[in-house]
Amino acid sequence: MTTGHPFAPPAHEQHWVTAASELAREFAKSAAERDRTAELPIENLRALHDSGIDAAFVPVALGGEGLSYRSYGAIVRTLSAACPSTACIWVMHIGAAVGLVEMSTPDTARFWADELVDGARFANALSEPASGNLFLQPLQHAEPAEGGHRLSGAKRFSSGCEVADHFLINALVDGQPAFFGLDLDPTTMTFVPIWDTMGLRASRSQLIEFAGTLLPEDRRCPPSTGPRPNHIGAGLAFLSLGIADAALAALTAHARDRAIPTTGEPLASMQWVRFAVGDIASRLEAAAMYAQHMTWLADQNDTGFLPATMHAKLQANTIARDAADLGVRIGGGSGYTRGDIERAFRDAPAGWLMAYSGEICQDTIGASVLSPTTP
Ligand SMILES: Cc1cc2nc3c(=O)[nH]c(=O)nc-3n(C[C@H](O)[C@H](O)[C@H](O)COP(=O)(O)OP(=O)(O)OC[C@H]3O[C@@H](n4cnc5c(N)ncnc54)[C@H](O)[C@@H]3O)c2cc1C
């Protein structure tokens, strides 16, 4: 995007986006192998921290730079195009850490900010086996105990949980949803290796079992005073945009290289390929522009942010799937064998599944449009 465009990363933050792009180039080299082994990309996550990017997200009042959502979106997209598992874990890490900073009382907020700066790792433990997509409406009760409440139950699909020091977790307290910051407690928490998936394999989004884990009262987040942007809601669209970029790059490389014997010309010169690629590229531009608009709303703390996340995620999830699908058509048998086209095809559906799913976004947007109270 043109420098100086209102949706682009602010000029004084551009160096962070450049730093992330340079790191991403390195991450791309091992992405296929990580996908094969489903090994957690801890070196990539440490490199991101060591670059200073994590600390830059700490609010200005706590000594950080309060990096904008516009820069955040650009960083997530570039990381995801290179290694979507790294990007997924990093979205959850920044989302949990900055979320805890912003939702906590001042002293506790400073503790979380210091932990992030010092290199502690954060994960989200929100989704439950039963609650599924409705992760803000937990179904598991935490029971009163000395020092707080104790949780026995399970959280599912916690990306990067195996290397996390702290968790953003929610549970019902006195029948109402409440957020807590939780330190890893190996005596009551067990990671169950359920994560043998078709895509985003290195995100290792395992199930966590809790056996009477204390959710400490002094780490309980006070009730929210109103809507505010958050990095998970903002990040998921960019996770899919990055996968769409990777799918488009892979199919383009194949279309340029593959000569069709009947014409002697590359596949790229065929009209149906040009039509299809033109359609994908144009829709990707539009989805990206809308997602950048969503981050601009976040930077204004505009109440339009939340509905915009639904539109942005839906468009980005759809274009990722469509680009990956076109990749397999253009790739033919070659695209169906292990490689960049095939990997994007397996990674692409993840964005649609992640909460809120494509169907929930469609349902929410449709209900709003159809509501008799909508002008
Ligand atoms: C790669 C990946 C990483 C993840 N990382 C994390 C993480 O770090 N932390 C975390 O807490 N969670 C994480 N999740 C969980 C994720 O955000 C979702 O909560 C989870 O995928 C929902 O899965 P489910 O099987 O319970 O789906 P379900 O909610 O059972 O959905 C199944 C189907 O029902 C539909 N559906 C469900 N509810 C509704 C509704 N109300 N209206 C219309 N349709 C509906 C869905 O669209 C879907 O088609 C991750 C998931 C993935 C795939």
Image (cartoon, helix red, strand yellow):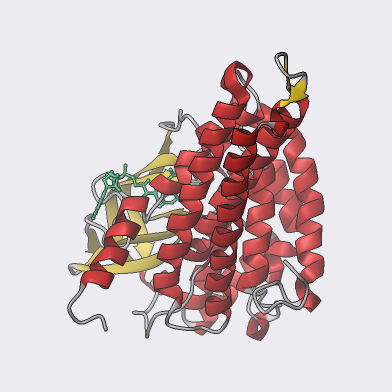
Q: Quadrant of the C terminus?
A: bottom left
How far across and down, in percent of the image, does residue 19 sit? 81, 59
Which residue is at a point 64% across and 74% down the rendered structure image? Answer: 7
Which corner quadrant of the image does residue 180 belong to?
bottom left
From where the camera sits, is residue 114 visible?
yes
Which residue is at a point 76% across and 70% down the rendered structure image? Answer: 2
Q: Eyeballing the image, is 85 above or below 174?
A: above
Residue 63 horizontal side relative to residue 218, left or right: right
Residue 249 horizontal side relative to residue 142, left or right: right
From where the camera sits, is residue 201 visible?
no
Q: Eyeballing the image, is 330 above or below 216?
A: above
Q: Nearer the viewer, residue 118 or 277?
A: 277
- Farthest top residue? 261
Q: Eyeballing the image, is 254 above or below 214?
A: above
How far across and down, in percent of the image, does residue 216 sit? 38, 66
Residue 284 horizontal side relative to residue 352, left or right: right
Q: Quadrant of the N terminus?
A: bottom right
Q: Eyeballing the image, is 191 above or below 215?
A: above
Which residue is at a point 59% across and 21% down the rendered structure image? Answer: 332
Residue 38 horizontal side relative to residue 230, left or right: right
